[in-house]
Image (cartoon, rainbow, N blue to C red):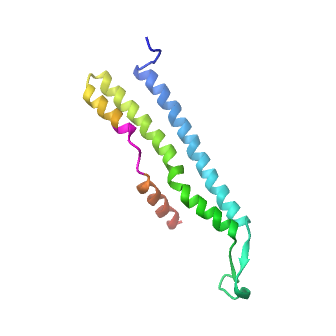
Amino acid sequence: MTGWDISPGGVQSVVSQVREAAGDMSAGIKLYGTAVQGAMESAGTLTVGGGSAANGGRAAGLVAVALGQFAEGTEADVAFLPLRASNSANGAVEATNAYITGNLEQAWNAQRQAMLAPDVTALLQAARDRAAQR
């Protein structure tokens, strides 16, 4: 006996906990984004060329630029986390359901698919499109 509960109820309980954690992770990511944006806005500006530019001659300060570059450089990694958790939870449900119905090949396929790293490119593009519409 392994101690693992692979019944539908046992798997559903674990999946529920994973989804709750993924939801918390998503909320944390939104908070992170808001905090980075606030830090960028509070980091100050540089005066450029005597203040004659359309925005009052002010440009984002070096700290704001660095924060923006950091956020941009890590966005795929940050978006990957909840997407991976969600895909893994959904794969566990699909594999368990297939296993219970006796379809071992389908269960194996669901497990294999759940282990693949998600592609966050489309997710990030959709988020950028939504942000641009605001």
Give the vertical position of 101 relative to 40 (above or below): above
- In this picture, is 11 found above or below 79? above
Name the spot of residue 4 as percent of width and height, x first: 45, 18
110 left or right of 88 in image: left
Total marks placed: 0
Q: Residue at x 30, y 30 (%)?
A: 108
Q: Which residues are magenta?
A: 113-119
The x, y position of residue 127, in whole percent, is 49, 58
Q: Quadrant of the N terminus?
A: top left
**Nearer the observer, 48 or 37:** 48
Whether the magenta-drawn stretch holds residue 103 is answered as no
Task: Give residue 36's position: percent from left, percent from top.
Answer: 65, 58
Q: Is residue 33 above or below residue 83?
A: below
In this rendering, the answer to whether 115 lies above or below 49 is above
Q: Tell me what residue is drawn at x 74 percent, y 70 percent.
A: 44
Please tell me which residue is depicted at 60% across the width and 51% down the height of the picture.
30
User: Within the image, what quadrant is residue 46 found in?
Assistant: bottom right
Q: Residue at x 61, y 64 (%)?
A: 68
In the image: residue 24, left or right of residue 121: right
Image quadrant where one finds the C terminus: bottom right
Residue 87, quarter of the rendered image: top left
Q: What is the x, y in percent for residue 10?
A: 46, 21
